[in-house]
Image (cartoon, grey):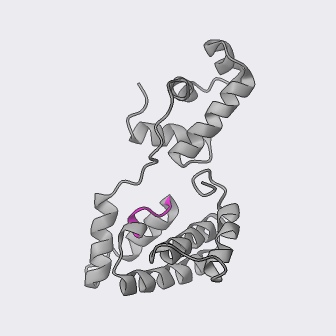
């Protein structure tokens, strides 16, 4: 949830216990997902070197587990870097499978927007302020802010601009 809300440092700190083995994992691919969260966090922090090293580690673990789906569901930045890395025609069969998964799976939040969230979302491209949106919908500013936070979380974005772009990609806007 922290990563989906754009709080990548918080997400990275939450997975430290899992990485260090302090928390038991229920699924064999959970450590792979932890590595991919660390990649996304490093990319958002501007630490490309750490991101690339962790991504290499994730690919090695994914190969040993024979699992590609977590790569396709990784964060936006991680998927972009990964797609660039494995675009080479000389890739091995495992990275070819990752490439196919990246093109076949469109990671989207499973939580649908409520009717009110959809109404707020429809007004985000207008550049109205939260106060103006509240007046338009005859609700309080705090209600609008709550809806905006929920929209960001459900769309996996951290800003209004990203929310509008993602909503357009998913055909959620009129």
Confirm whether residue 160 shows in the render.
no
Where's residue 88, x and y in %? 31, 78
Regarding residue 53, the answer to whether it shows in the image is yes
Q: Position of residue 36 (x, y in %)?
A: 52, 71
Q: Which residue is drawn at the image coordinates 59% and 77% (left, top)?
A: 24
Instruction: From this view, report whether residue 7 is shown above or below residue 30.
Output: above
Q: Residue at x 69, y 26 (%)?
A: 143
Q: Quadrant of the C terminus?
A: top left
* Quarter placement of the N terminus: bottom right
Which percent across, then down, holds residue 11?
65, 63
Main SS of the magenta segment?
loop
120 with respect to 104 (left or right): right
In the picture provided, is 36 more to the left or to the right than 83? Answer: right
Q: Is residue 96 magenta?
A: no
Highlighted range, magenta: 71-75
Check the image and report above or below for 138 versus 147: above
Q: Nearer the viewer, residue 89 or 39?
A: 39
Q: Residue at x 49, y 67 (%)?
A: 78
Q: Nearer the viewer, residue 135 or 33?
A: 33
Q: Is residue 69 above or below residue 122?
A: below
73 is within the stretch colored magenta: yes
Point out residue 129 in the picture as x, y percentages from the top left corner. Answer: 68, 25
| Residue at 55% over, 84% down | 53
């Amino acid at each position: 949830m922290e990563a989906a809300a754009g709080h990548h440092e918080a997400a990275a700190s939450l997975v430290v216990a899992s990485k260090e083995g302090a928390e038991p994992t229920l699924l064999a691919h959970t450590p792979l997902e932890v590595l991919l969260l660390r990649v996304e966090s490093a990319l958002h922090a501007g630490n490309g070197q750490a991101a690339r090293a962790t991504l290499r580690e994730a690919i090695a673990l994914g190969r040993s587990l024979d699992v590609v789906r977590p790569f396709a569901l990784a964060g936006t930045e991680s998927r972009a870097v990964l797609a660039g890395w494995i675009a080479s025609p000389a890739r091995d069969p495992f990275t070819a499978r990752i490439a196919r998964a990246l093109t076949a799976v469109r990671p989207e939040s499973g939580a649908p927007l409520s009717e009110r969230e959809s109404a707020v979302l429809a007004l985000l491209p207008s550049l109205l302020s939260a106060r103006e949106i509240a007046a338009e919908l005859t609700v309080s500013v705090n209600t609008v802010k709550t809806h905006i936070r929920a929209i960001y979380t459900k769309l996996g974005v951290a800003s209004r601009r990203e929310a509008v772009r993602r909503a357009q990609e998913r055909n959620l806007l009129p």
